[in-house]
Image (tube, helix red, strand yellow):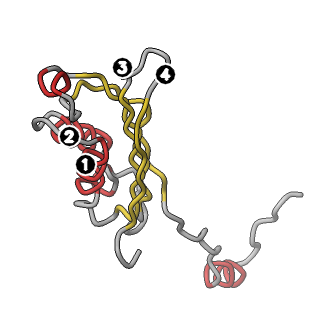
Amino acid sequence: MAISKPKSAASKKVISAFPAPRAARVPMRLFIRDLVLSARIGVHQHERVANQRIRLNLELEVEAEGPINDDLEKTVCYGELMTGIRHVVGHGHVNLVETLCERIAEMCFADRRVQSAKVRIEKLDVFPEAESVGIEIERRRPGA
């Protein structure tokens, strides 16, 4: 079906007086998948002295504060998240995977646009018969 163009100035005014409705804004999902890092993590003596591989998955629910308009400043930047994750993971020994998950979620909430964070961390080389063991947490900003 072809849409006909307005034929007069008066009909143009009527059309512009009733702009097309905008789509409702829903939160965006930002994710980082299968990030493999080296971490000093675990309660056993051998885990305290040597790094081990972990795999991290992160999913954030992000509420935009308006139109993005192709402006990086209006987004939660993947690069900044990666830098933050590397800093948290590399900041000394942690006993529990749960603690590391909580620290990463907390780091994500430093950006007020982040409404929820799902963090999954797997230790990859714990048991030869298992691909991985780990924890997944999901946290929501209070009031969100």
| Residue 15 position by quadrant | bottom right
Q: Secondary structure at mark 2?
A: loop
Q: In the image as oriented, which residue stretches furthest toward the top? A: 128
Is residue 136 toward the left or the right of residue 2 in the image? left
In the picture, the disc for residue 47 is: none
Give me the residue at 36% from left, 19% from top.
Answer: 125
Q: Amino acid at mark 4?
A: Ala
User: Which numbered disc, 1 or 4, marks the residue that appears first in the sequence?
Assistant: 1
Is residue 19 toward the left or the right of residue 45 in the image? right
User: Which numbered disc, 3 or 2, marks the residue that appears first in the sequence?
Assistant: 2
In the picture, the disc for residue 99 is: 1
Q: Secondary structure at mark 3?
A: loop
The one nearer the camera, 108 or 37, is 37
User: Which numbered disc, 4 or 3, marks the residue that appears first in the sequence?
Assistant: 3
Where does label 2 land, which residue? 95
Q: Amino acid at mark 2?
A: Asn
In the picture, the disc for residue 125 is: 3
Which x, y percent locates residue 28?
Answer: 48, 57
- Placement of the C terminus among the 4 image quadrants: bottom left
Q: Secondary structure at mark 1?
A: helix
The span from disc 2 to disc 1 (Cα, nearest Å) is 7 Å
Give me the residue at 25% from left, 57% from top.
Answer: 106
Q: Nearer the viewer, mark 2 or mark 1?
A: 2
The span from disc 4 to disc 2 (Cα, nearest Å) is 21 Å
The one nearer the camera, 62 or 143, is 143
The span from disc 4 to disc 3 (Cα, nearest Å) is 8 Å
